[in-house]
Image (cartoon, coloured by chain):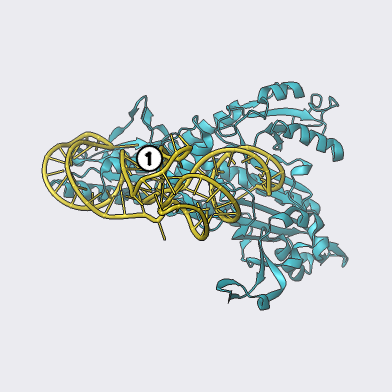
Chain colours: A cyan, B yellow
Amino acid sequence: MKTALSVTRSDNFAEWYQAVVRDADMAETSPARGCMVIKPWGYGVWELIQQSLDQRIKATGHENCYFPLFIPLSFIAKEAEHVEGFAKEMAVVTHHRLKMIDGELQPDPDAKLEEPLIVRPTSETIIGDAFQRWIRSYRDLPLLLNQWANVVRWEMRTRLFLRTAEFLWQEGHTAHATEAEAREETLRILEMYREFAETVLAMPVVAGEKPEHERFPGAVTTYSIEAMMQDGKALQSGTSHYLGDHFAKAQNIRFQTETGDWAYCHTTSWGVSTRLIGGVIMTHGDDDGLRLPPAIAPRQIVIVPILRDKPEDAEVLAYCQALAAELSARTAFGVPIRAIVDKKPIRSADKRWDWVRRGAPVIVEIGPRDAAGDQVTYMRRDALRAGEKVASASLPRGAFIGAAEQLLADIQASLFNEAKARLDGNIRTDITTFEALAAFFGPAADDDDATSAFKGWVRVAWARPTGEALEAVVARLKSLKLTIRVAPADQPDRFGPCIFSGAPGVEEILIGRAY
RNA sequence: CGGGGCGUGGCGCAGUCUGGUAGCGCAUCUGCUUUGGGAGCAGAGGGUCGCAGGUUCAAAUCCUGCCGCCCCGACCA
């Protein structure tokens, strides 16, 4: 069967991913190392992600603000674990002027900054500085802020959307009077992310707590949502951190209580990034390219007129325009349907396949017979093929317009259900010994990452060791290229023995390979 | 930063071992034909072969150095 992409998922998953990013017009690598240019189609997806998440952030009482890109170097050093966690991947601004020296444009030695500025890898420290000035009284709490921003982390190896040196995200930062309130906030956001991922991105996730060694630098507790990609690997898709009073103490974020005493705030931070788009690609993409959930598709219904340089072309076009206008007057997911007529002067068959690769949820093809017969012929991108052939259906125009909202909802649901079945069906719970775990995942050595067989995750009990015992566990897993993803939120009442030590288990965790 | 691979028209590649002055497919442009589906024929445009040195009558090809990209580690949203 001829597919719209030159590489299939089973050929080489990593290459397939790159092909989708390229052929779906999502993004490309930039001349700046490790960075990406997000193209209109990809950025359109990000804008829709922003819109629906921003609504949820505001609905839960948060306000947007904006802090600077630069952070004074000394700020980042305030919280010990935080420095250690980020120091190795920091972009640093040291000069403020260039000069031609020996025919080469370079930083002017006479223009050195007294204090270097770092480009934010995350904004806890500079926002904490503001918190310290803004918070005086218990009446100022809770302080619930969010910002949409870009951040920079100098990663060794980058992949478009999944890990780039610069990425776009939102970061929430809140301060609370008590630990209980801050923890409640942390979990509220985790639930917000889960609901958002599942209903808007149609990407099922497991929400849970990260083990100690996977925590955000400086956090007391880190939660994440983990999604399963089509190669069985986990993608950490959003995080929510309870920071305790670590940053409050480091930055003197204090308030006077009702009784006049001084107390440190409890802070939280949380974020999701453009990585979500990588998750959408690897969750829903197929061998014909991207399949976008309608809720985040910049164009939900694309109408391709079949033009043949004949007099009836004008009628076909007019029919298409009218159809687009009527569809745009309807709503889906609470907002107007995003429909367009693709009038680009290229062959209609090429247009079809371009939109297939981009993942437009519904592709409508209108020829003279449709226009004359007042009907609509369309394809669903989530069910593009029936065997070897492309599957299309026809409806009377009025019926199609009336059914459009439901059609988009059905596609959204079918993408979710397909991914949900994959997630639920690939978490093994019957592995109880480390030997069985090793046998299941196979040796890491001769395992080419890009082509390794689908494995999924394993759910096991453990005794939640700490310190050296935990390090030993991490090392054993690492030899199998495995990591502990999360301790899922839903835990049973009783536990089997620890898979690592045989000691009584205290918690169940998910183990798998990860991005 | 270690190990492997690769840089040749927009994209994908051959040519490199055995130096002789650049080729294929797709895409692009033009014309004709075709037209409910990723078309056919004919013609055209487009490359300082990653960069800098060196060897040579002659370098995409050999030598040295550098840069970049991809895959695998270390690091990570």
* x 56%, y 71%: residue: A104
What kind of element bears circle 1? helix
**Quadrant in which the C terminus of chain A is drawn:** top right
Q: Which of A436 and A261 is in front in this view?
A: A436
**Quadrant in which the N terminus of chain A is drawn:** top left
> Label 1: how many residues lie within 10 Å, few (<14), some (14-19) or many (20+)?
many
Report the residue that reaches farthest toward the bottom: A110
Residue A302 x/y as whole percent = 34, 45
Residue A300 x/y as whole percent = 39, 45
Pointer 1: what residue? Answer: A356
Q: Looking at the picture, does residue A96 appear above or below residue B58?
A: below
Kind of residue sitting beneath label 1: Val
Residue A129 x/y as whole percent = 74, 67
In-image side of A199 versus A495 (left or right): left
Q: Nearer the viewer, residue A426 or B4?
A: B4
In-image side of A76 versus A12 (left or right): right
* x 67%, y 29%: residue: A445
